[in-house]
Every structure is written in C-alpha cells, then in structure tokens.
Amino acid sequence: MRSRTAWVVIAGISAVALGATGVAGAAAWSDYQARQDAPSAVTTTDGDDLTGADRIVFRNTAGGQGYGHVASIPLADPDGPRAVSDIACDRVDATATEVSCLRTVRGITPLYTGTLYAANGDQLAQWPLSGIPSRTRISADGAMIATTAFVTGHSYATIGFSTETTIHSPDGSDLGNLEDWTLTIDGAASAPVDRNYWGITFAGGDTFYATVGMTTQGVTYLVKGSLSERSLTSLAENVECPSLSPDGTRIAFKRVTAGSGPTVHWTPAVYDLETGAITLLPEQRSIDDQIEWLDDDTILYGVPREDAVGDYDVWALAADASGKPSVFIEHAWSPAVVR
C-alpha cells in the first residue's frame, strides 16, 4: 500500500514538474514571438531584391521584425534605411546575382542547411550541412560556393573542434570535403589525418585560399588550393579565415596573438602575397570573423555588442594599420560587399 502511495506521489510531482516546464516553454516562446513581432529597432524597407551592384548584403541583427534576415544597403549610404528580406540566415555571402545562405532550422532535432538564392529571392539550390553553420563564400563568377560547418564544437576557440568544408557549384556538383584533398606542408606531403579546413576565399579561375588546422600540433596554415587538381599547398603559419583583397595582392585574416583554447585572442592582420610580409592591425578586441574587404584600402568585420546577446555591429579598419576601428553598419553581421 505504501508502495502504491509513493508512486502516486511521484506521479503527481512529475505531472506538476512537466506542467511547469510546459508553462515555462510557452512563456519563453511567447516572449520570443513578441520580440520578433515588435517594430524593428532600425529603419527598414521591403527587400524583394536581395542584392544588386554597389551594395552590402548582411545578416540583420537589429531587434524586432526582420531579426536574423538577409538585408542590404547601398555602398554609398551605410547609415541609410536597410532593405530586409523574408529569408533568415546565420551566415551570408553574395554576388550581384546570387546569395549563399547558411541556416540553422531549429526544432527538437536541429537541421542545418545551405541554400543558394537568386537576387529576386528564388531558391536555386539547397544542400544539407553536417553541423552548425560557420563560413560561406561565393566565387566572383558565381560558379563555386564554399561552406564550412562545425561537426563538433561551436567555435574555433573550442578545444577538439571539428569542421567540414566543401565546395559546390550551383548545379549541385560537389567537389567533396577538403580533408580528402592532397595537402603539402612546407614542401612535404601531409597524411590525410589530424586536420581541419575552414575560411575559403576564391581568387578566380582555378585558385582559392583557405585555412588548415593541424589538430595535435596546434598549428594553422594559410594554404593555396587548386580546384582542378584538388590539392592544397601551405604558404604561411598562424593564418586563419583568409579573405583576398579586390586587387588580388593581399589577404586579410585573423591571427592568434595571445592565449589558447577558450581564451585565444585573434588580431586582424594583412598578408602580402608577393613579399610574405604580415601587418598586424590596431584592433585591441579579439576578432572571430572572416574579414571582408570594403575596397582595397579598408576591411570590414563583425563584433558582438556587449549589451545585447545576438546583436552585432560591422566595423571598418584601414588595411595599412593607419587608423583606428570605427562602426560602419550598426546591428549587422556577416557583411558581403557586392561590386
């Protein structure tokens, strides 16, 4: 009898606990919906066209309607009203005719997708990602789309993280995981183990650049890749998330300048492809982003706001280390300059 009474009590407590969880979940969802339905914190216009020449495409992080959606502004008016689309993305890149969108589809079991959109918002292609979206780049001619996802871990500061980086074409052709390509480090062939790739930047034609991290050694390299040969060759150490300048002469990147693991500090820097010279830029904060070039003289990168979780600003900095960082676009992330 006592046993039956005990089970009744346990069942009652469980029911109350489940009910409380349900109430809390409903309240959290209601709060989320209220924030999503609130008026935008910035001035917006309809974004029927996702892109076009002489614009900056980015992820809108202003609170209210349109949070997390693809947005764009004219290059000549970064403080002006932003056109916000109906498409939600975690990471974005764009050309004048296409937009690459990496997204987490939240649910009981989250799904991760890469999607290619036309400028008018029509879906051109979609493919699954193996984990949390991280980086994406489209080649200037739109022929290749690169994506990086975290298979384990959720940041490059996580000990033991693993990535998968692949290159697609709009017709669905897949060149495979870069981990299966031939890698040469300092002139010697590297065995296809203990390595992760991320941060592709296309150079046009057959060439691209990327980062390879050798896990057990704790070393990262800038590598130059060949699409036709499916091969990569090291150029320099301690280079992450490369981004090729518009004139093709320099690579902006983030460099570890202090700490390790979860306390790592990344400083933006520029690598001269002809001389191999590296210039550290005057940014005191740790920058965990794949840098974008505004033009041949200025770089852009995202920085999280300290006072608002999930909100960012895009900052600008002279590529020759001659000036201080300044806010370029408020409430924005993952900028793509479209010329």
Image: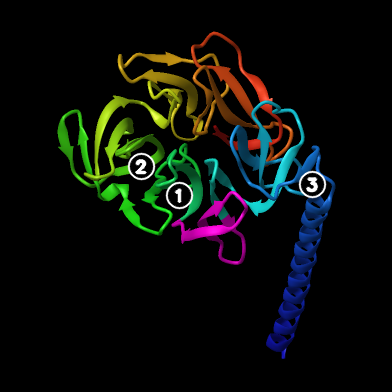
Image quadrant for the N terminus? Answer: bottom right
Q: Determine whether 227 is above or below 75 in the image.
A: below
Going from the N terminus, do you reach mark 2 or mark 1 first? Answer: 1
Residue sitting farthest toward the left: 188
x, y percentage for residue 126? Answer: 49, 60
Going from the N terminus, do you reach mark 2 or mark 3 first? Answer: 3
Decide if residue 167 is on the left or right side of residue 281. left
Three-letter residue code for mark 1: Ala
Residue 187 tag number: none
Three-letter residue code for mark 3: Gly
CA separation in Å, label 2 and label 3: 35 Å
Q: Quadrant of residue 285?
A: top right
**SS under mark 1:** strand
Decide if residue 297 is on the left or right side of residue 202. right
Q: Which residue corresponds to mark 2?
A: 197
**SS under mark 2:** strand
Going from the N terminus, do you reach mark 1 or mark 3 first? Answer: 3
Q: Determine whether 54 is above or below 279 in the image.
A: below
Q: Which residue: 49% across, 12% down?
A: 320
Q: Determine whether 114 is above or below 249 in the image.
A: below
Magenta stretch holds residue 118: yes
Q: Which residue corresponds to mark 3?
A: 64
Residue sitting farthest toward the top: 322
* Magenta segment boundaries in residue numbering: 104-130
CA separation in Å, label 1 and label 3: 27 Å
Q: Which residue corresponds to mark 1?
A: 149
x, y percentage for residue 283? Answer: 56, 18
Residue 312 in view here: no
